[in-house]
């Protein structure tokens, strides 16, 4: 089959016989034709950050991370005189936190960063599951360290949190790119435009779970350093709360993929039970520093799991699975439109 291009459009874009054009299918069934020079210009686009203006702590790192998340592949860091050692250390540190980002060239006044992430190698479902495993592991290691008074295990949990950040930043980058480029949406399996904002929330919740778990591990290390002696019965009760929290977290994420409304509802009911138990523990816990902080973190993690379960229910209603269809069915009724009175 052949397609005739509008002559005025051909002239405006300087297209000649034999030139390449890109055909991009849209979700509504239409086909978008993109001139090659526009595609090449997009690929070659470079973003420049003036390090001289990044005079506040952490500002440069946040700008680099933000540019990475927005899908920018080429980032140039410049200075009118010389990039300071603090900024260089900051750049080297952030490069290790971002998958696929590396330093391509470096001079006293310029540092060129380039991202080589191939979206075709990642699936959003896989990244969500991977982030869940990491966050869940940090949580379990923190609480096992609490149970055993094991400082080295708590330190391991703290170190693992950076891995969660890497997966989170990569997933958000791909998700935002999927909203702009249909081909990336196909690669990563994020073609459901309605669910993309909810996916972003789930990723953020899982990253927060890792943060709260890391915070608990740090508090557990402080408890060990202080030598506070905790009653065994209190330790056991808090560890039990962590096991319930872990169940809420894991089942809520599973529901996202299975669409099992009953399990999601069970998670929400379990959260009510946990909230009652954490309230009791907050009143009964001895006045030892950081102890109530650990209980509070467990309650916050359970809250995030419960919200994820709600998202799972909404997704199941939007795209009924074999589990949801048994509970909720759509029945269409013919509507009778009243006739307008005849004009006399």
Image (cartoon, helix red, strand yellow):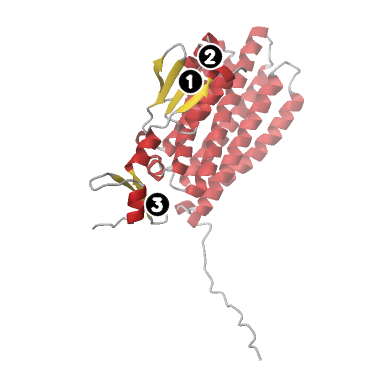
At x 52%, y 66%, the residue is 331
Residues at discs 2 and 1 in contact (Cβ within 8 Å) = yes
The residues tagged by marks 1 and 3 sit, at their Cα atoms, a distance apart of 36 Å
Residue 87's disc is 2
Query: Whole-Å distance between the Cαs marked 2 and 3?
Result: 42 Å
Where on the picture, by quarter, is residue 224?
Answer: top right
Res. 77 mark: 1
Residue 177 showing in the rendered view: yes
The quarter of the displayed image where residue 104 is located? top left
Vertical side of 156 occupied by 71: above or below: below
Q: Camera-side residue: 312 or 239?
A: 312
Which of discs 2 and 1 lies nearer the camera? The answer is: 1
Count the marks.
Answer: 3
Instruction: Please name the residue that numbered disc 3 is placed on.
Output: 26
> Disc 2 versus disc 1: distance between alpha carbons?
10 Å
Q: Are marks 2 and 3 in contact (CB under 8 Å)?
A: no
Horizontal and vertical percent for residue 190? 44, 43
- Measuring 41% from the left and 53% from the top, which residue is drawn there? 27
Q: Quadrant of the C terminus?
A: bottom right
Check contact, mark 1 vs mark 3: CB within 8 A. no
Under tag 3, what secondary structure? loop
Q: Residue 134: horizontal and vertical position, in percent?
A: 49, 26
Q: Earlier in the sequence, mark 2 or mark 1?
A: 1
**Image position, residue 41 (x, y; %):** 38, 36
């Amino acid at each position: 089959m052949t397609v005739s291009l509008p002559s005025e459009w051909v002239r405006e874009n300087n297209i000649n016989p034999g030139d390449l054009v890109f055909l991009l299918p849209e979700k509504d069934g239409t086909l978008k034709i993109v001139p090659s020079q526009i595609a090449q210009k997009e690929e070659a686009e470079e973003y420049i950050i003036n390090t001289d203006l990044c005079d506040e702590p952490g500002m440069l790192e946040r700008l680099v991370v933000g540019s990475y998340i927005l899908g920018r592949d080429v980032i140039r860091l410049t200075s009118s005189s010389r990039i300071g050692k603090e900024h260089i250390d900051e750049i080297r540190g952030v490069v290790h936190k971002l998958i696929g980002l590396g330093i391509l060239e470096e001079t006293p006044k310029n540092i060129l960063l380039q991202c080589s992430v191939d979206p075709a190698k990642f699936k959003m479902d896989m990244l969500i599951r991977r982030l869940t495993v990491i966050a869940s592991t940090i949580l379990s290691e923190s609480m096992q360290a609490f149970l055993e008074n094991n400082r080295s295990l708590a330190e391991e949990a703290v170190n693992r949190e950076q891995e969660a950040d890497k997966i989170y930043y990569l997933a958000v980058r791909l998700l935002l790119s999927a909203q702009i480029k249909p081909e990336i949406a196909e690669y990563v399996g994020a073609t459901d435009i309605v669910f993309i904002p909810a996916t972003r929330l789930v990723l953020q919740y899982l990253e927060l779970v890792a943060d709260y778990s890391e915070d608990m591990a740090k508090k557990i290390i402080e408890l060990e350093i202080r030598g506070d002696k905790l009653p065994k019965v209190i330790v056991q009760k808090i560890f039990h709360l962590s096991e319930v929290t872990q169940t809420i977290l894991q089942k809520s994420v599973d529901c996202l993929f299975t669409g099992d409304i009953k399990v999601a509802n069970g998670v929400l009911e379990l959260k009510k039970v946990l909230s009652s138990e954490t309230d009791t523990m907050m009143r009964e816990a001895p006045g030892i520093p950081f102890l109530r902080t650990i209980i509070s973190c467990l309650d916050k993690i359970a809250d995030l799991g419960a919200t994820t379960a709600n998202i799972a229910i909404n997704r199941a209603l939007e795209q009924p699975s074999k589990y949801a269809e048994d509970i909720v069915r759509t029945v269409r009724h013919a509507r009778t439109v009243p006739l307008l009175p005849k004009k006399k």
